């Protein structure tokens, strides 16, 4: 999907969400309107994401870096450090891609909730969200030229659907740096992708700015 297409989809999703939650007699829960997160708050989230990638801890007598990947994991950085200090096995904890985003942004915006399609009831507020829910219901699409640290980078699978999400930490003239909980590497890592590259064209669905109450 092109950047323009993603932007149009983002605005369509926001409009549909508004209709679902605001239509009289729809039975939907009343949900306060959401606005894009400010660049200042987004920058704080980017710094917190880096902490997840740079955290160091011992494992089998060796120093490791990056919180472990764990499918469905929701371990916060504070919980992880405290548990490791108390002798817990680091591999018993961790985060996945969406869990990282949820934890990072909730550390900057305490009590943050997300939106998810709740069937006939329309959109509902939830405390957790997977990558697809974040993409469809919780971001405004942004072009690369407008992106800032803290914006979200979405990955796509063979079907073109969102399969993962990362947090952008730096945007350079020829590369986008981001932090992601990588299943392949088994931990949260700092890495980058080059816009226009074969990897970018084949794996990146688009960029989005988180919507918050």
Image (spheres, rainbow, N blue to C red):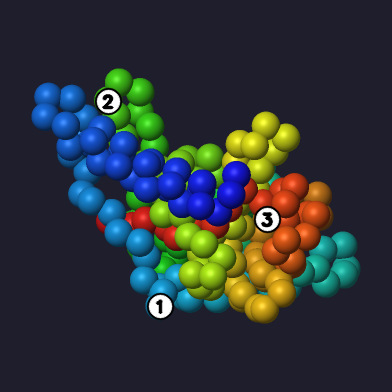
Extreme-top residue of the structure: 120
Q: Is residue 133 left or right of residue 205?
A: left
Name the residue tied to disc 3: 181
Q: Give the mark nearer the N terminus: 3 vs 1.
A: 1
Residue 164 % position (x, y): 63, 47
Residue 87 % position (x, y): 70, 61
* Distance between the alpha carbons at the discs numbered 3 and 1: 23 Å
Which residue lies at the image location 22% right of the left edge and 43% below the top edge? 31
* Residue 22 showing in the rendered view: yes
Name the residue tied to disc 1: 40
Q: Is residue 33 left or right of residue 185?
A: left
Front residue of 200 and 5 = 5
Query: Where, by quadrant of the figure, is residue 173 drawn?
Result: bottom right
Name the residue tied to disc 2: 121
Please determine whether, in this image, residue 50 is positioned above or below residue 27: below
Image quadrant in which the C terminus is located: bottom left
Please determine whether, in this image, residue 98 is positioned above or below residue 169: above
Residue 29 % position (x, y): 21, 34
Q: Secondary structure at mark 1?
A: helix
Extreme-right residue of the structure: 61
Which residue lies at the image location 72% right of the left edge and 35% below the top edge? 158
Q: Residues within 10 Å of mark 2 (few under 14, many from 20)?
A: few
* Distance between the alpha carbons at the discs numbered 2 and 1: 34 Å
Q: Secondary structure at mark 2?
A: helix
Query: Where, by quadrant of the figure, is residue 126 drawn?
Result: top left
Tag on residue 64?
none
């Amino acid at each position: 999907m092109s950047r323009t297409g993603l932007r149009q989809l983002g605005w369509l999703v926001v409009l549909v969400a508004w209709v679902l939650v605001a239509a009289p007699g729809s039975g939907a829960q009343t949900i306060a309107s959401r606005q894009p997160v400010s660049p200042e708050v987004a920058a704080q989230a980017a710094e917190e994401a880096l902490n997840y990638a740079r955290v160091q801890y011992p494992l089998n007598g060796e120093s490791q870096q990056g919180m472990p990947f764990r499918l469905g994991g929701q371990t916060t950085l504070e919980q992880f450090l405290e548990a490791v200090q108390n002798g817990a096995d680091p591999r018993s904890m961790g985060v996945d891609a969406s869990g990282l985003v949820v934890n990072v942004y909730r550390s900057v915006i305490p009590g943050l909730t997300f939106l998810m399609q709740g069937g006939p009831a329309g959109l509902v507020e939830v405390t957790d969200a997977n990558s697809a829910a974040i993409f469809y219901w919780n971001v405004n699409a942004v072009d690369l030229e407008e992106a800032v640290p803290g914006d979200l980078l979405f990955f796509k699978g063979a079907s073109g659907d969102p399969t993962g999400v990362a947090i952008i930490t730096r945007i350079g003239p020829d590369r986008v740096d981001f932090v992601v909980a990588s299943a392949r590497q088994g931990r949260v890592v700092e890495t980058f992708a080059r816009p226009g590259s074969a990897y970018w064209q084949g794996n990146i669905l688009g960029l989005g700015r988180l919507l918050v109450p």
